[in-house]
Image: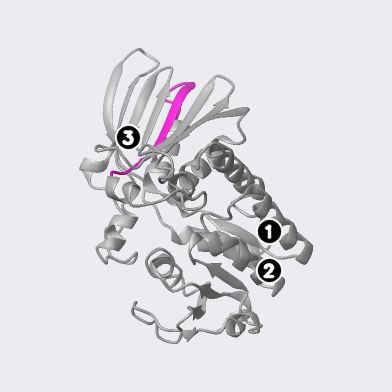
């Protein structure tokens, strides 16, 4: 194996994030990925061990291994900034699970340090490869909706017990946990907004979890609303796109996470694919004034693409897909949105 032309990866963290949301994808790219080392404080794992991987409780096994050229940080949210900084100072490229840091200033410091050292650092924004997001892009780019007026991106769940039993924390808030996905989707596709209005709440009262967010990103006459709640007994559509000539509604989200929870793997037939009942509905008037209403077959999402993108940047020198300025804006919006919460 010509490892110098591979992503030789170490994971710092050996919990659900690594084993459910990373390894099922990175381990199925043998042509570009070699998983070398996985660190946890105990050095042991409650998850099945991967053959040929070094499991360790000593970070120096990562930092002093010259072959490792990408370290993925999947530890609890409050540790992301410190570990990312430590890993950059050890001379390693870094991929950081969301949320990237706690504040915009921390994020800027990490990006500046990476540039100073000539290293790669990026936030793991796998939701750019969600099927609902990819399908929505396909519909918009078909032009049948005409000029866009309103875009709504929702990330709703119903978990009042979690809200009731949690206390307020900026970095462990619902905004940072899942709003970071939706904000990144909006900014990655529509670009930098002219201005942002926000409404974030603690529905169960002061001192409780931030369990609601609503951000309006304005682009001239277009408003992109990014919202989510932990208290929605029935979720709003994942995407609702309103144009001058029509509307597209995609009710359900990408299926990859659901399939992972059922122990399906990305190389199994049908993994991540929507069934017809999950397809979005497109309603529009064509150029002849004829009314159409039709189901749109969903695109297939694939989180492996994140690692393909990183390979192209680290090994082949291509531009990063997730831009620093996009992550900085996501951090700024999330941080500003909770300035009055406690």
Residue 150 occupies quadrant:
top left
Q: Between marks 3 and 2, how big is the CA–CA gap? A: 40 Å
**Residue 122, x across and y down, in percent:** 60, 58
Secondary structure, mark 3, is loop
**Residue 120, x across and y down, in percent:** 66, 63
Residue tagged 3: 237
Total marks shown come to 3
Residue at point 59%, 21% (across, down): 220
First-in-chain label (3 vs 1): 1
Residue 8 occupies quadrant:
bottom right
Residue tagged 1: 110
Secondary structure, mark 2, is helix
First-in-chain label (3 vs 2): 2
Residue tagged 2: 88
Specify whether residue 200 is painted magenta: no
Specify whether residue 157 is painted magenta: yes
Work out whether residue 122 or residue 169 is closer to the camera in this orientation and state it: 169
């Amino acid at each position: 194996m010509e490892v110098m032309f591979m992503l030789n990866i170490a994971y710092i963290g050996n919990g659900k994030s690594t084993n459910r949301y990373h390894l099922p994808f990175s381990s199925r790219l043998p042509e570009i990925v070699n998983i070398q080392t996985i660190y946890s404080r105990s050095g042991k794992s409650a998850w099945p061990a991967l053959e040929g991987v070094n499991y360790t409780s000593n970070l120096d096994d990562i930092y002093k291994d010259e072959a490792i050229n990408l370290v993925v940080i999947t530890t609890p949210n409050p540790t992301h900034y410190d570990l990312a900084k430590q890993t950059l100072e050890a001379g390693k490229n870094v991929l950081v699970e969301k949320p990237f840091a706690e504040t915009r200033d921390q994020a800027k410091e990490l990006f500046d340090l990476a540039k100073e050292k000539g290293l790669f650092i990026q936030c793991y924004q796998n939701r750019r490869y969600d099927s609902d997001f990819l399908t929505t892009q396909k519909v918009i780019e078909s032009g049948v909706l005409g000029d866009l007026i309103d875009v709504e991106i929702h990330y709703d769940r119903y978990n009042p017990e979690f809200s009731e039993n949690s206390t307020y924390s900026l970095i462990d808030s619902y905004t940072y946990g899942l709003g970071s996905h939706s904000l990144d989707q909006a900014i990655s596709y529509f670009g930098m907004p002219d201005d942002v209005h926000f409404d974030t709440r603690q529905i169960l009262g002061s001192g409780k979890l931030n369990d609601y967010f609503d951000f309006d990103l304005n682009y001239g006459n277009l408003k992109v609303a990014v919202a989510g709640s932990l208290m929605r007994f029935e979720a709003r559509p994942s995407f609702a796109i309103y144009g001058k000539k029509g509307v597209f509604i995609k009710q359900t989200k990408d299926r990859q996470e659901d399939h992972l929870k059922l122990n399906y793997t990305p190389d199994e037939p049908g993994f991540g694919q929507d069934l017809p009942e999950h397809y979005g509905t497109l309603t529009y008037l064509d150029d002849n004034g004829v009314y159409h209403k039709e189901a749109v077959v969903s695109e297939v999402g694939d989180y492996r693409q994140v690692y393909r993108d990183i390979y192209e940047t680290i090994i082949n020198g291509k531009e990063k897909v997730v831009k620093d300025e996009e992550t900085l804006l996501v951090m700024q919006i999330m941080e500003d949105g909770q300035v009055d919460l406690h």
